[in-house]
């Protein structure tokens, strides 16, 4: 006997979907071509057909509480084959954004990060913060007199203080958001235990084995794989240096020959290349495949910005040019933006998708 | 009452055109019926049985041929195309270009030419699934009952047919002929063509031999078809143990035909019945979005669906792979009502491809909608479209429309002679 | 002047090789003293035909009746078309002998000789037809003033024909006059059309050729095509007129919603039908009937009654479109209103698919496949609707202010034969002397009571006062290729009474019906039969002095061509007649005959067959073929050079229903060993062009078989086979199988008597 739903369409939610990302949502007439062509859809709980209907009907809690929306890699196969032009891929993108907002804590950050009108604010805050620290912060005891060094602008301990604090906040944001989301999955009865399934999920993430099956878009899978690994590399280096410094084990600036330095530079290069692929892919033939929204651009631009300014400031430092300070300042601002928005921007998917994959038994696809 | 008026022109000798011509002629009009092929009958002549009665089209065609034979008011032109049309309601000037048949009306149907002919040609009546001699009769009940010679298929300088014919009916020197007529009105009944299934990349037509279309299925099931009425797999000529029908193959699809072709549901139900009655052990699955059987066709739907060997699954078949070992096909769809992916192994897959109007060559004056269907609402008075060139529809609806179009044409004649 | 028969034998197309044509010529000269006998190597060729024309034109003519022994009568019709005053008999030596029998054999020659004899005898017994020349009215009667009737009237008038339009309501317009908007009719097929009916009504009211009667009904329609006399009951008293043909456009009525209690009708005033909603919409903003509050949520239940064997087994074809349209009414009336649509299959064929897609685009219209399993009244005044079998993988409960039942269409038709049967049985209840009969009659009356007083045309026909109906009460055609075929010549149904359809289709349908009506009067004026024997000038004559009033002819005519007087004597109406000859077959007194098709003629043809003595072991088998389907099939078998028994002799019949059992008696008494009848399929999906012909033949045959047994003759000597025209490969097998069986039975004991 099937469960019984009392239908109360959330028209606000529906209109929001239609307004941003899911404009063609209502065109779906449930032929299920999408579920059949999707390489990631599963035998017993196929998507995106049913989620399309739930979204059409504005069944907010039901559809946002469905881990399936995270299993989609937005390859656009469904959109390309949809006979009605309902663009399920775009709808799923919009659903993921709505889910992040819906589960976000604190909620206002969820709103800000996904609202272009709030962008100046997101920029202004770090600018003011670092501006303040630069102007009134503790004078950097010039460890390298007469040289152009990062530490001359902001003493390392100060930055550590700032970023460790932020990290803590970010982790908290992730934790709460995830907790809410997982509870929603459970309420929907759509989730298996996460921890035992985490390993297989991570294996899939590490290899992108299933993502590779997404017929249409090789570039997306390759790009995404590179960006992910590059990002992991940078994150690792950042953490190691940070902690190492704290422990007094690492002393910046590192020599170019230093393994960490090499890893950092390599990772940066990988991220940039990956981003290039993704970017190029998104620009070619957007009508047929995935449409790109502010939600996507915000993440892509900030991430690219971080890496580019990082590389540039490094270069200027090598050249011992004063301009380095300015670039480094921008670099820090962007890192701040990336960090703070992590649980609410597209970047959040790294947590949600991982959990969703685990919650769906560590496996998507057939 | 209108016998003294100008004739009317009917373009297309399929069931709709034939009907328009006959109904108008029996009411008293003179009619010129122009058909581009060598014989009348169009699409229906290629069908095995009609739904929902499961009766042969040749039954009604024979009656209509007799009505034409016995009616001196109808002039039939085959291998003919309307080249130029000018004028207005009540008085059109039309030019018809008639390709040579190379066989004259002296032909007695004895068949000596075909027996003597050394050359073969692909038989487009069977969508190229079989061959005929270069001197051939389109099909056993062809009307006009005259052989044709496909000169393109003839070896250089060959005159075997001419030597074989004892009635001097073969004229290899025959030339293209151009005729001019003054007519009071024009009925376009140029019919339809099946949508090119090869353009639906995920369904494998053209890549996998055992993926066929519904029009080919009609030929395979027809007693006068390439397999003599046995439904056999193109890959190995064996009877299929299971047959899958894919509805809306191109229709209701913004990437192909945005409209519904209106007949494919009933057609597939009919073809499912062919398979089941021919092979009682066989299994049939029909993947559909909505089953559309309006009016009394619902009875037919209920009757066919009651057969335990036929399963209807709501969900569009969107992925077809071939098992290279057996030539079988794996058809994947979501079973929407059970919310699970299902993959069915099929010996033969039939794509229910849709209707594309044959409106490209219509004379100026006919107005077409965004899909290419000729419109009567905004077309010029004196020019009327009927049948599938006007709207995708089943045979009886085409005939119904054609009868109506005959009256519109009849009115033009009546007006031009002052009777109305 | 004694008739001169000219026999022209073609030796072409292999006839000369297969047969001794000189022998045939000798037979014609000898046995039949034919006035002219010619052999020609290509009779259909220019000089062959010239030869015949020369004999016809000679002074005095060398021949006035032609026997053309060549190819099938289906072939070379142009070549052998002489003026209709000349009797032309075609003997099929090619398809039925030369192409289907071994050349040069004695049996083949004998077959040809018999066919020639039969042909000559047939010609002798044939007379040129005298066309029925009677004054006809060209006026068209249109019954029903809805969209179909209005269109039919305008189109017929537009073709120059006077029209009499009868509407039972006080005003024209029918259902469409009550709708707010109509379905999209033009590209892009997404916008509802404003009703275009008013203009049309105006045109009708002021058209010089159209006479309109409103609030009127037909009390009597007598006569026949070209000569229907109609009596009307109108507000201004009785009126009468003579018309040539009739178009029945009485439209439809909504299905009785009180029978839809299971979907909540009657539960609350807030459960309405789509027709009721249309009225509400036309009247003004749509509000909740119970309290006049605005509608916040509405739910449409598709197929309310339709596609349901317990209610309307058919699909009403328009409800999906109507619902999409009405959803739009509600949404445009209240931008916050939510509309739910629950359907079995969403049916928007053709270009209407675009309308569906556009309707979907509305954010607050929610569609799903599903079945409504319950509608309940809630404490808060709303209606709770439970939906099962949805693609959501869950059952739904939707609480709404308004439930709209998409109820289907029921034709405004009357079942003529049923009404007749009702009246007959009512009479029996009063008059039958046996109690059992009275009881049986009373039972039938009960079953048929619902037809009481449903008459529309009040036809003065023996077969009943209205058109016969097919399944579900639609007086539709049974034929796919002939959608206007009718069993009452000159009377054509159009619009929603014929089949469920929308307004646009009904307009289109009316056009076709008008064409058929016009055609019917024009062909009557020329004395011609209509389809399927279009153009046939012959018709049966009745030698009534010998009529025994057995009523078989009047009962069996599928087209109601024959009325009865008080005594039961048939009264023939030539323009109702389709010339199938079923009456001829029915008559035990052999008093019904056509000038070129008579009981005596076929009997004489049978007598013309030479039957060898039994010790020759050459059986003779008579095959009666339906000339519409079975005969062409045998032609094609010949064209395919299919061999079959040389002992068969084929006689084509206009319809197997014209088989008179006398012929079977004649055949058997002549010593013919077996008789095979091949006709069209009968049953629900019958293919007989004259409706019941082959079935009647079958019934008659079973009666004969009983007599046969009394005569100690094996009933297997008679057999009827049903054959479709495309079964031309099966026909020779079927003939041979029967020949073999007859062979086993041995010779007919009556041989030689």
Image (cartoon, rainbow, N blue to C red):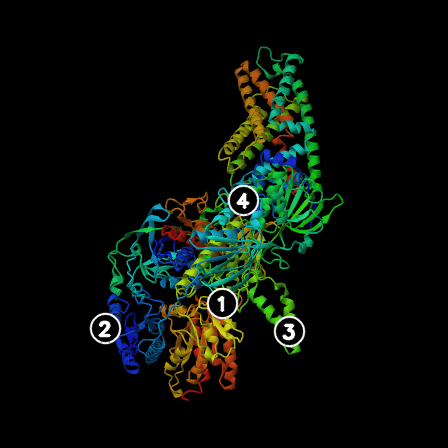
Q: Residues within 10 Å of mark 1 (few under 14, many from 20)?
A: many
**Residue A286 sits above or below residue B47 on the image:** above
Nearer the observer: mark 1 or 3; the answer is 3
Q: Is residue A341 left or right of residue C209?
A: right
| Between discs 4 and 2, the one toward the N terminus | 2
Give coordinates of residue C43: x percent, y percent. 27, 69
The answer to whether residue C346 is visible is: no
| Picture coordinates of residue A153, whole percent (x, y) | 61, 15
> What residue is shown with label 1?
C559
| Residue C195 numbered tag | 4
Contact check, label 1 and label 3, Cβ < 8 Å: no
Mark pair 1, 4: CA separation: 39 Å
The N terminus of chain B: image quadrant:
bottom left
Instruction: Give how far apart the Cα atoms at labels 1 and 3 are.
Output: 29 Å
Residue under label 2: C59
Tell me which chain the residue with mark 4 is part of: C
Crowd class of label 2 (few under 14; some 14 to 19; many from 20; radius 10 Å) = few
Between C638 and B381, the residue placed more toward the observer is B381
Circle 3 is placed at which residue position? Answer: C430
The Cα atoms of the two marked residues, 3 and 2, are separated by 69 Å
Q: Earlier in the sequence, mark 1 or mark 3?
A: 3
In which quadrant of the rendered view does residue B312 lie? bottom right
In the image, residue B169 sits, relative to residue B257, either above or below, namely below
**On the picture, is C456 further left or further right than A112?**
left
Q: Label 3 marks which chain's residue?
A: C
Give the vertical position of C443 relative to C332 (above or below). below
Q: Earlier in the sequence, mark 1 or mark 4?
A: 4
Per the image, label 1 sits on a secondary structure element best described as: loop
Q: Please, what secondary structure does the residue beneath circle 2 have?
A: loop
Label 1 resides on the chain identified as C
- Report helix, strand or loop for mark 3: helix
4 vs 2, front mark: 2
């Amino acid at each position: 006997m099937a469960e019984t739903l009392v239908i109360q369409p959330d028209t606000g939610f529906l209109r929001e979907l239609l307004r941003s990302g899911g404009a063609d949502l209502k065109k779906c007439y449930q032929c299920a071509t999408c579920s059949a062509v999707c390489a990631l859809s599963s035998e017993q709980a196929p998507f995106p057909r049913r989620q399309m209907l739930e979204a059409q009907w504005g069944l907010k809690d039901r559809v946002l509480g469905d881990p399936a929306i995270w299993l989609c890699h937005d390859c656009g196969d469904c959109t390309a084959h949809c006979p009605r032009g309902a663009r399920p891929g775009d709808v799923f993108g919009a659903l993921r954004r709505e889910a992040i907002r819906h589960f976000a804590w604190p909620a206002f950050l969820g709103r800000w990060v996904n609202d272009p009108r709030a962008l100046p604010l997101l920029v202004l805050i770090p600018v003011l913060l670092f501006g303040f620290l630069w102007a009134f912060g503790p004078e950097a005891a010039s460890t390298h007199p007469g040289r152009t060094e990062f530490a001359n602008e902001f003493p390392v301990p100060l930055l550590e203080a700032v970023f460790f604090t932020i990290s803590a906040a970010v982790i908290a944001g992730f934790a709460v958001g995830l907790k809410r989301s997982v509870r929603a999955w459970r309420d929907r009865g759509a989730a298996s235990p996460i921890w035992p399934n985490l390993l297989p999920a991570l294996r899939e993430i590490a290899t992108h084995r299933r993502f590779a099956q997404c017929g249409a878009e090789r570039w997306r899978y390759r790009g995404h794989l590179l960006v992910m690994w590059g990002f992991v590399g940078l994150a690792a280096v950042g953490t190691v240096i940070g902690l190492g410094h704290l422990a007094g084990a690492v002393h910046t600036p590192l020599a170019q020959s230093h393994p960490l330095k090499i890893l950092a530079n390599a990772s940066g290069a990988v991220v940039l290349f990956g981003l290039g692929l993704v970017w190029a892919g998104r620009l070619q033939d957007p009508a047929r495949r995935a449409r790109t929204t502010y939600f996507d651009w915000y993440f892509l631009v900030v991430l690219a910005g971080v890496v580019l300014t990082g590389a540039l400031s490094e270069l200027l430092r090598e050249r011992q040019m004063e301009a380095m300070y300015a670039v480094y300042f921008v670099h820090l601002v962007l890192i701040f933006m990336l960090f703070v928005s992590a649980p609410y921007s597209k970047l959040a998917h790294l947590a949600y998708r991982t959990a969703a994959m685990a919650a769906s038994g560590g496996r998507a696809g057939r | 009452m209108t016998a003294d008026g100008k004739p009317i022109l009917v373009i297309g000798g399929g069931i709709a055109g034939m009907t328009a011509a006959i109904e108008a002629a029996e009411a008293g009009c003179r009619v010129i019926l122009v058909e581009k092929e060598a014989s009348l009958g169009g699409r229906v002549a290629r069908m095995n049985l009609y739904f929902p009665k499961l009766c042969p089209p040749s039954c009604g065609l024979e009656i209509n041929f007799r009505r034409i034979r016995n009616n001196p008011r109808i002039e039939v032109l085959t291998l003919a195309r309307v080249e130029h049309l000018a004028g207005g309601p009540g008085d059109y000037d039309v030019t018809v270009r008639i390709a040579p048949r190379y066989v004259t009306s002296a032909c007695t149907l004895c068949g000596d030419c075909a027996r003597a002919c050394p050359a073969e040609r692909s038989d487009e009546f069977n969508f190229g699934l079989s061959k005929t001699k270069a001197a051939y009769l389109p099909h056993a009940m062809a009307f006009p009952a005259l052989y044709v010679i496909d000169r393109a298929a003839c070896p250089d300088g060959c005159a075997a047919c001419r030597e074989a014919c004892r009635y001097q009916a073969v004229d290899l020197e025959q030339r293209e002929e151009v005729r001019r007529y003054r007519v009071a009105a024009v009925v376009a009944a140029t019919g339809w063509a099946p949508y090119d299934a090869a353009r639906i990349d995920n369904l494998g037509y053209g890549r996998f031999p055992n993926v066929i279309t519904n029009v080919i299925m009609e030929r395979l099931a027809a007693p006068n078809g390439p397999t003599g009425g046995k439904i056999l797999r193109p890959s190995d000529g064996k009877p299929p143990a299971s047959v899958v029908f894919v509805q809306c193959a191109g229709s209701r699809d913004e990437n192909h035909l945005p409209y519904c072709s209106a007949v494919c549901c009933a057609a597939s139900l009919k073809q499912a019945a062919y398979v089941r009655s021919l092979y009682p052990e066989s299994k049939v699955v029909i993947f559909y979005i909505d089953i559309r059987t309006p009016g009394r066709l619902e009875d037919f739907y209920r009757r066919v669906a009651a057969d335990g060997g036929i399963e209807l699954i709501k969900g569009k078949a969107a992925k077809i792979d071939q098992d290279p070992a057996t030539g079988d096909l794996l058809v994947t769809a979501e079973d929407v009502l059970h919310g699970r992916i299902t993959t069915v192994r099929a010996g033969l897959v039939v794509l229910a491809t849709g209707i594309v109007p044959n409106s490209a060559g219509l004379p100026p004056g006919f107005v077409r909608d965004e899909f290419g269907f000729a419109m009567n609402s905004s077309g010029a008075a004196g020019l009327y479209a009927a049948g599938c060139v006007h709207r995708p529809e089943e045979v009886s609806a085409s005939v119904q429309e054609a009868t109506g179009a005959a009256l519109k044409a009849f009115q033009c004649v009546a007006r031009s002679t002052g009777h109305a | 002047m004694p008739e001169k028969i000219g026999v022209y034998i073609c030796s072409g197309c292999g006839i000369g090789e297969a047969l001794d044509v000189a022998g045939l010529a000798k037979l014609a000269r000898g046995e039949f003293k034919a006035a002219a006998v010619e052999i020609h190597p290509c009779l259909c060729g220019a000089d062959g035909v010239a030869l015949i024309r020369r004999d016809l034109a000679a002074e005095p003519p060398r021949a006035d009746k032609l026997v053309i022994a060549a190819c099938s009568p289906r072939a070379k019709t142009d070549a052998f078309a002489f003026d209709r005053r000349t009797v032309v008999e075609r003997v099929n030596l090619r398809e039925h002998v030369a192409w289907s029998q071994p050349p040069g054999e004695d049996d083949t020659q004998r077959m040809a000789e018999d066919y020639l004899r039969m042909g000559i005898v047939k010609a002798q017994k044939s007379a040129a037809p005298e066309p029925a020349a009677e004054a006809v009215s060209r006026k068209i009667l249109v019954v029903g003033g809805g969209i179909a009737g209005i269109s039919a009237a305008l189109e017929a008038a537009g073709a120059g024909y006077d029209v009499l339009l009868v509407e039972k309501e006080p005003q024209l317009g029918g259902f469409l006059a009550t709708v707010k908007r109509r379905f999209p009719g033009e590209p892009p097929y997404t916008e509802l059309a404003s009703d275009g009916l008013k203009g049309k009504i105006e045109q009708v009211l002021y058209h010089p050729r159209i006479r309109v009667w409103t609030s009127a009904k037909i009390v009597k329609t007598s006569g026949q095509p070209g000569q229907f006399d109609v009596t009307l009951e109108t507000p201004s008293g009785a009126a009468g007129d003579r018309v040539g043909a009739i178009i029945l456009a009485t439209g439809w009525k909504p299905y009785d919603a009180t029978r839809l209690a299971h979907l909540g009708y009657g539960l609350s005033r807030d459960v309405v039908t789509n027709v009721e909603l249309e009225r509400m919409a036309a009247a003004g903003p749509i509000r909740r009937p119970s309290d006049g509050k605005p509608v916040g949520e509405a739910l449409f239940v598709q197929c309310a009654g339709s596609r349901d064997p317990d209610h309307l087994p058919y699909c009403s074809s328009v409800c999906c479109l109507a619902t999409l349209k009405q959803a739009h009414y509600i949404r445009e009336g209240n931008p916050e209103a939510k509309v739910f649509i629950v359907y079995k299959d969403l049916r928007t064929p053709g270009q209407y698919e675009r309308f569906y897609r556009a309707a979907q685009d509305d954010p607050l219209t929610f569609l799903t496949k599903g079945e409504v399993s319950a509608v309940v009244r809630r404490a808060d005044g709303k209606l709770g609707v439970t939906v099962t079998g949805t693609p959501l993988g869950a059952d739904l409960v939707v609480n709404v202010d308004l439930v709209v039942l998409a109820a289907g269409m029921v034709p405004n038709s009357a079942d003529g034969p049923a009404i007749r049967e009702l009246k007959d049985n009512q009479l029996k209840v009063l008059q039958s002397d046996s109690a059992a009969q009275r009881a049986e009659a009373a039972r039938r009356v009960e079953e048929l009571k619902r037809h009481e007083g449903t008459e529309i045309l009040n036809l003065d026909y023996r077969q009943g006062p209205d058109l016969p109906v097919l399944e579900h009460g639609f007086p539709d055609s049974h034929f796919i290729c002939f959608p206007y075929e009718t069993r009452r010549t000159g009377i054509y149904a159009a619009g929603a009474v014929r089949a469920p359809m929308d307004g646009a289709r009904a307009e289109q349908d009316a056009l076709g019906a008008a064409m058929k009506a016009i055609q019917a009067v024009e062909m009557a004026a020329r004395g011609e039969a209509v389809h399927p024997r279009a153009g046939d000038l012959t018709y049966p004559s009745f030698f009534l002095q010998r009529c025994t009033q057995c009523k078989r002819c009047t009962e069996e005519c599928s087209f109601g061509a024959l009325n009865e007087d008080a005594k039961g004597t048939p009264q023939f109406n030539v323009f109702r007649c389709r010339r199938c000859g079923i009456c001829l077959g029915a008559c035990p007194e052999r008093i019904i005959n056509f000038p070129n098709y008579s009981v005596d003629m076929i009997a004489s043809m049978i007598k013309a067959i030479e039957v060898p003595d039994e010790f020759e072991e050459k059986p003779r088998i008579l095959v009666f073929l339906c000339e519409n389907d079975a005969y062409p099939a045998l032609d094609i078998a010949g064209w395919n050079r299919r061999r079959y028994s040389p002992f068969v002799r084929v006689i084509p019949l206009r319809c197997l229903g014209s088989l008179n059992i006398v012929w079977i008696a004649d055949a058997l008494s002549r010593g013919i060993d077996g008789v095979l009848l091949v006709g069209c399929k009968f049953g629900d999906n019958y293919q007989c062009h004259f409706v019941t012909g082959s079935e009647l033949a079958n019934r008659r045959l079973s009666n004969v078989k009983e007599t046969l047994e009394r005569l100690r003759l094996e009933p297997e000597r008679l057999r009827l086979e049903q054959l479709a025209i495309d079964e031309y490969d099966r026909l020779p097998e079927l003939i041979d199988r029967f020949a073999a069986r007859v062979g086993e039975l041995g010779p007919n004991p009556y041989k030689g008597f």
